[in-house]
Amino acid sequence: MPRVLIADELSPRALDIFRSRGVEVDVRIGLKKADLLTIIGDYDGLAIRSATKADKDVIAAARKLKVIGRAGIGVDNIDIPSATARGIVVMNTPFGNSITTAEHAIALMFAAARQIAAADVSTQAGKWEKNRFMGIELYAKTLGLIGCGNIGALVAERALALKMKVIAYDPFLSPERAVKLGVEKADLDDLLSRADMISLHTPVTDKTRNILSAEALAKTKKGVIIVNAARGGLVDEAALRAALDSGHVAAAGFDVFTTEPAKESVLFGAPNFVATPHLGASTNEAQENVALQVAEQISDYLLTGAVTNALNMPSISAEEASRLRPFMDLIDKLGAFAGQIADDGLEAVEIEYEGDVAQLNTRPLTAVALASLMRPLMPDVNMVSAPAVLKQKGTSLTESKRETSPIYGSLIRIKVLTGGRWRTLAGVVNAGTAKIVEVKGMPLEADFHPVMLLINNLDKPGFIGALGTLLGEANINIATFHLGRQAAEHDAIAIVGVDQIVPEAIQQSLRALPHVRYVKMLKF
């Protein structure tokens, strides 16, 4: 039975989901790092929010861990590269608090435009400074969105309902999607010069850090309002304070800060600044949603292999996992075959999908192939870590798809460049069983066997007899025997299933047979 640790506050209904699915769950909230390091090795899954830090030390100690689930969007508290290297899937729940966060951004926009926080303090102090707090309408104003993904799109929808004009800077926003959302796609400088209000909805990356720098703020319209309910670090806070003090920026509303908890900030004290303590996802509805989602996602992965909202591997629905399973077995064995004949290292990998399999989500299949391909040299690699490791090593990967296959309903072919030579093989699923149907371009049909000999030879009379005699004298039983060739007296392949490991001395004797070019023992 899989075992999951809940290390941060989650809805009690999340526990019910785990237990109803047959997952053992322990709740240990507020653990010190030393205590977490002591117990994490006993768990298959870890469910957290933002308090628990799944850093490289925790991940190194998590010898059984298969999945980390973050109830929420931000994963700053998870060392994703370390998790990926260890083959641990990292998931978040990006949609459970989307509406809540979008609503909070709109609320900050209203609060900044109408100076609600300052007016509240003044009014409750008995000052009644009605003339002091002259606000602006959102109606007919231009809202510039920096980032127009899930939350940005929800903000756009609400802004359009307020009769605002919305322009968006997002390199990943397609023109078709922009039209569907009713927003105008713009470059960053254009947005900065035109927007009456700017709202940020992008993660922090090397490219987005301080995207609103002093230089960028200088390009904005005088009187602009800035809202950040996304991530701290997107705005140069010192530069923004200077712009607020000068009046170039009329007002700002922030829910997030470069350093959190924000006990102090250069922005604090500005009369035209409103702040909240990272409340974007803080509604009862959102907390319930993300807790239930993370419980479902972790359970699905541990029990069925379904992957949802993963940040370090392709997502696979339960239905997809079921449809892919026969091909997963096939490509795992093909990858293992290819990895064992890559004698001189991996210089390049090509994977071809033909027929019905090409219509499926092949990214998980490729991940499985790479893991089994690399495992002879890296025993701990898996489908999560393999793509990242291959990229890190600079090995090129090419994938191609053909809607039809000349002979089979579905075929998968793997090619590896090793020592300057390409080695190829292909396989199919026949009646639910993985089969080899091509090696080195030569057709044949062979079942996978736990121990196999791959022999490349010239097709000359006497080879099969000599092979059988040598194995028989060594008391090695032949279980299966399959041949493929180009033509008589040309290149040929023999795949021989045997019932025991073939000693190196016998392999050397096989290599010494006339016309034999290559011998490799394969294990599956």
Image (cartoon, rainbow, N blue to C red):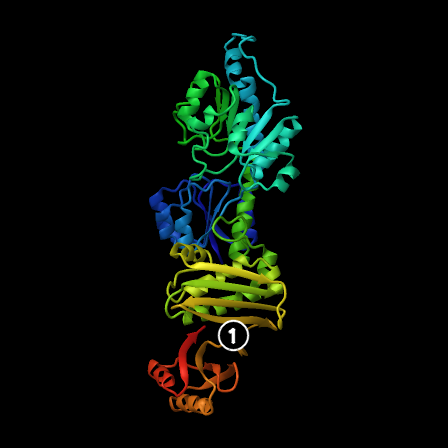
**In the image, what residue type sits under mark 1?**
Gly
Q: Which residue is at 59% across, 42% downward?
A: 174
Whether residue 453 appears in this view of the structure is: yes
Whether residue 285 appears in this view of the structure is: no
Relative placement, left or right, of 335 versus 104 is left
Q: Quadrant of residue 180?
A: top right
Q: Would you place residue 516 above or below residue 159 in this image?
A: below
Q: Would you place residue 519 above or below residue 383 in this image?
A: below
Q: How many marks?
A: 1
Q: Secondary structure under badge 1?
A: loop
Q: Which residue is at 58% across, 57% downward?
A: 361
Q: Which residue is at 62% across, 71% downward?
A: 406
Camera-side residue of 245 and 286: 245
What is the x, y in percent for residue 134?
A: 56, 12
What is the x, y in percent for residue 290?
A: 54, 41
Label 1 neighbour load within 10 Å: few <14, some 14-19, many 20+: some
Relative placement, left or right, of 371 versus 328 is left
Q: According to the image, label 1 marks what residue?
A: 441
Camera-side residue of 27 and 450: 450
Q: Would you place residue 230 above or below residue 503 in this image?
A: above
Q: Give the quarter of the figure containing the C terminus.
A: bottom left
Camera-side residue of 487 and 255: 487
What is the x, y in percent for residue 481?
A: 50, 84
What is the x, y in percent for residue 208?
A: 45, 36
